[in-house]
């Protein structure tokens, strides 16, 4: 069973990495970019075959390791 | 107009970052993980209002800056 995890910065948290990308795009001539936010994307290949259990397990992984819940949100998709 | 970009390593390209995540999950007791692949996720806020033009522009950004097309794939979603 596969899981897709998105980890993104919460609204209002400064994103220097995204800002650096926006600046670099501007220097390449892409002026029509108001803002860039950069997050992480993970694909997990799980042994678990029950979707509900897999989702619960991945959410626990997100809380414990994959995201910093003080400043980041995460979403989990089971496929 | 918003664009969501996923940049992932091509199949067969080694992913030491994902492997490090898998190892760390194992050490935390999450044994049911066969593999982890880590990619990047970007949200762009564009001035362009035409979806087709916006998509073409973002694909050009991916080719020129956001991804390394030798080892990475990218997908663009316009929302």
Image (cartoon, coloured by chain):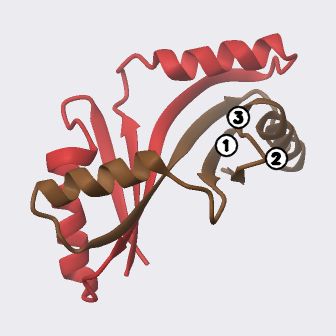
Chain colours: A brown, B red
Q: Judge depth for marks 3 and 1 and give the one in front.
A: 3
* Same subunit, tags 3 and 1: yes
Read off the residue under disc 3. A66
Could you say where residue B67 lies in the image, as x and y percent from the top left? 26, 42
**Distance between the Cα atoms at labels 1 and 2?**
8 Å
- Residue extending farthest left: A29
Q: Given contact means CB atoms under 8 Å apart, are the residues at marks 1 and 2 in contact?
A: yes
Q: Circle 1 — which element?
A: strand
Q: Local crowd at mark 2 within 10 Å, few (<14), some, or many (≥20)?
A: some
Q: Which residue corresponds to the image point at 18% horizontal and 60% vertical from the top-left?
A: A26
Could you say where residue A24 lies in the image, as x and y percent from the top left? 22, 50
Q: Quick check: B7 left or right of A65?
A: left
Q: Which residue corresponds to the image point at 90% horizontal and 42% vertical from the top-left?
A: A53
Read off the residue under disc 1. A3
Q: Circle 2 — which element?
A: helix
Could you say where residue A3 lies in the image, as x and y percent from the top left? 67, 43
């Amino acid at each position: 069973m596969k899981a897709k995890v998105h980890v993104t910065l919460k609204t209002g948290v400064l994103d220097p990495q995204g800002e650096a990308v926006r600046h670099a795009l501007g220097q390449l001539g892409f002026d029509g970019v108001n803002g860039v936010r950069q997050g992480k994307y993970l694909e997990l290949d799980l042994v678990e075959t029950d979707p509900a259990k897999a989702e619960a397990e991945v959410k626990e992984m997100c809380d414990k390791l994959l995201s910093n819940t003080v400043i980041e949100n995460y979403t989990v998709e089971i496929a």
